[in-house]
Amino acid sequence: MPRQPNPTSGLPPSTKRLHQFMNETGKSRSKFASELGLSLSGLNTIFFRGSKVSETLARATEQAFGVNHRWILHGEEPKIVGSNALNPSDIWRLNMSSPFQYPSYLTMWELPKTLVTTAFQRKLMEMEMRLVFKRLTDHQVAEEVRSWYGQISNTLLMDLQDLITELPVNEDEAQRFSGKALIEFPKDQRKQWLTGYYYLMDLVIAGQEDRISNEAEKLSLEIDLQWIDQHREKFHGSWFGLCSRVEQAIAGAPDERLSLKTDKE
């Protein structure tokens, strides 16, 4: 009688450990998925596609069953740590904002766009304060900084609208899948959403090696990397050009700084 194939053969180590732990719980796969807040098809996809376990899924498993998320991801002991590693508010935030468990325009694009906008606005505020202390508030580059601050959210929105045009989706078909797990959405919708999702996150990474979109290949997720590269290069060209002009203005300004002391002091 021929030997039955190993069901975990060829899976990444993290996925093998998740499979091992699932068997140890004695729960059916559908029960295990339900307690994690996943659909059965969403959980099955991880094994069928041979994807690595994401940190979000590992942490959710830790919270639900008390298994160390670092054991799942990296094999680090101890294996069991209890189920109180994350506060309920942390779990709520991870679950409700997960684009893979609850894919939608909000979780895929709107939330990341808001976070990226805020990250760049913080940097712009730092630039403006440096210009203020060098008495350069009337300098042309100061006006550029203020313009960037007000326009960056709209700039990102226009990029996403361009993506919608270049990677169109059958809207009627997409509507039928509303509320489903990401893997259950049509392929063109997944690709469009994921391309925009990774584009937004890649914008805050200057280098190539650490860019977040590198995980897409590891997770077997289809994205339009060429579109991301083209638009990221254009965005970074404008951004780093602004940064350079700010530094030049500050370096060329007289060594006269705004005093925060009052005359009485």
Image: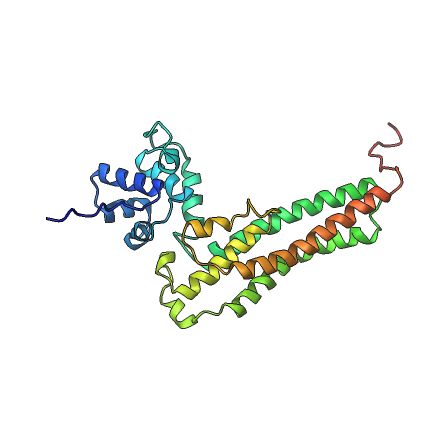
For this rendering, which residue is in front, 210 or 124? 210
What percent of the width, then of the height, locates residue 85? Answer: 40, 32
Residue shown at the point (60%, 60%) measured from the top left = 230
What percent of the width, then of the height, locates residue 53? Answer: 37, 44
Residue shown at the point (30%, 41%) measured from the top left = 16
Q: Quadrant of residue 259?
A: top right
Q: In which quarter of the image is residue 25?
A: top left
Q: Is residue 45 above or below residue 255?
A: below
What percent of the width, then of the height, locates residue 90? Answer: 44, 39
For this rendering, which residue is in front, 153 or 170? 170
What percent of the width, then of the height, locates residue 207? Answer: 60, 46
Question: Would you say 145 lies left or right of 186 here?
Answer: right
Q: How was this image coloured?
A: rainbow
Q: Is residue 9 above or below residue 151?
A: above
Residue shown at the point (66%, 48%) measured from the top left = 121
Q: Residue furthest left?
A: 1
Q: In this view, does 175 lie above or below 141?
A: below
Number of dots carrying numbers: 0
Residue shown at the point (55%, 50%) measured from the top left = 201
In what quadrant of the picture does the C terminus appear? top right
Question: Would you say 102 lies left or right of 213 here?
Answer: left
Question: Would you say 141 lies left or right of 121 here?
Answer: right
